[in-house]
Image (spheres, rainbow, N blue to C red):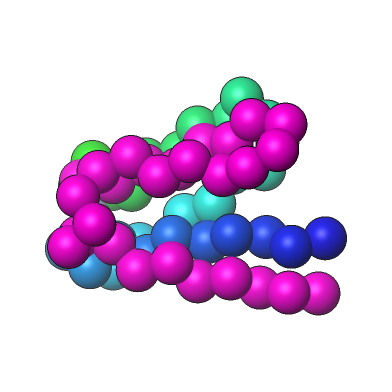
Amino acid sequence: MERIELKCLKCGDVIWSLYPGHMRWCSCSAIAIDQDEYMSRFIGRKEDMEVVSNDK
Ligand SMILES: [Zn+2]
């Protein structure tokens, strides 16, 4: 299963959502990630984040 990870360029945290409805914030609260049944959603400014996709 593909896991989307989001890296915060401000604090360096890498966050991911474990299951639909699970929302995670990075330490500095600049960005967050959550997901629904079909897709991941990113919260925050695009300039502050870097998407890391792990295809397994
Ligand atoms: Zn952060």
Query: Taking the image as four quarters, which one is ligand 1 found in?
Result: bottom left
Q: Residue 2 location in percent, x, y?
A: 74, 62
Q: Is residue 34 magenta?
A: yes
Q: Is residue 4 left or right of residue 27?
A: right
Q: Quadrant of the N terminus?
A: bottom right
Q: Residue furthest top?
A: 21
Q: Residue 46 location in percent, x, y?
A: 24, 57
- Nearer the observer, 56 or 39: 39
Q: Is residue 22 magenta?
A: no
Residue found 19% across the figure and 50% down from its top: 45
Q: Is residue 20 left or right of residue 56?
A: left
Q: Is residue 56 visible?
A: yes
- Nearer the observer, 17 or 41: 41
Q: Residue 16 location in percent, x, y?
A: 54, 51
Q: Is residue 23 left or right of residue 50?
A: right
> In the image, which residues are magenta?
30-56
Residue found 56% across the figure and 44% down from its top: 40
Residue found 47% across the figure and 54% down from its top: 15
- Nearer the observer, 12 or 52: 52
Q: Quadrant of the C terminus?
A: bottom right
Q: Is residue 11 visible?
A: no
- Nearer the observer, 6 or 26: 6
